[in-house]
Amino acid sequence: MYHILIFGPPGVGKGTQSQLIAEKKNLFHLSTGEYLRKAIDEETTLGKKAKDIVEKGLLVPDDIMIGIVAEALKANLDGKDGFILDGFPRTLDQAKALEVIFKEMGFNDIIIIYLKADENELVTRLVKRGRKDDTEEIIRHRLKIYIDSTEPIIDYYRSFSEVKEICGVGEIEDIFSNICEKLR
Ligand code: ADP
């Protein structure tokens, strides 16, 4: 069983690598960003609530995100060999709530992957990607939120768990094989 959390700044390639890992290891892949974008496209109640927040590059409230993740983990693990969470937790409160969810569900062996790249590389990649929240101004803002809210969580996990750091710059296949190496 693999219970993986993948961290890294916007644009580092978490989504791409998560998908590859999920395919290879038969995991449920939950990208909270993708989940929200789908809700926004489908104009669901959640989507209507989240639209403005996501498009401005702000964080959707913790209670909403925690509910989504708890539900999704409960509903999607049948037939899977674990999960990879991509984009969650993003705040310390989300991390603490996740601890409770994991305890309830009996997961105690969590693997932490931390993908890294420098800021200029990230901004260049994201501007090219051109999603609605990928204008330079919003990207800089998302990076700031990442540094203020999400990076401290990595230190939190470091205090009781190994954090597997991987360089997110280079060929997709090479980065993927570095991750696989660290998962062995
Ligand atoms: P990126 O990592 O490139 O910023 P994501 O697809 O992970 O992109 O997330 C896009 C947006 O979705 C975020 O900027 C935020 O508005 C919202 N979002 C995703 N996950 C969370 C979360 N765990 N908590 C709050 N907001 C979230």
Image (spheres, rainbow, N blue to C red):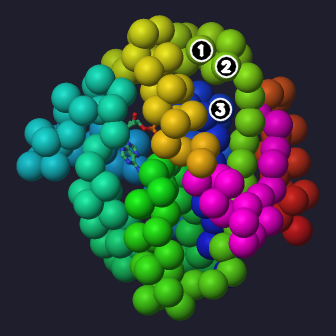
Point out which mark residue 84 bears.
none
Q: Amino acid at mark 1?
A: Val
Q: Report if residue 79 is visible in the image.
A: no
**What range of the chain is rendered magenta?**
153-168
Q: Secondary structure at mark 1?
A: helix
Q: Is residue 23 left or right of residue 51?
A: right
User: Front-most of 156 and 25?
Assistant: 156
Q: Amino acid at mark 3?
A: Val
- In the image, residue 53 sits, relative to residue 2, either above or below, namely above
- In the image, residue 162 sits, relative to residue 116, either above or below, namely below
Between the C-alphas of marks 3 and 1, the distance is 10 Å
Query: x%, y% of residue 25?
Result: 69, 67
For the point 26% across and 49% down, which residue is it? 61
Q: Is residue 13 left or right of residue 104?
A: right
Residue 119 on the magenta span: no
Between the C-alphas of marks 2 and 1, the distance is 6 Å
Point out which mark residue 123 bears.
1
Residue occupied by mark 3: 12
Mark 3 sits near ligand 1, with its Cβ under 8 Å away: yes
> Is the residue marked by circle 2 packed among few (<14), some (14-19), or many (20+) residues within 10 Å?
some
User: How many labels sit on residues?
Assistant: 3
Point out which mark residue 119 bears.
2
Contact between marks 2 and 3 (CB within 8 A): the answer is: no
For the point 26% across and 60% down, which residue is it? 63
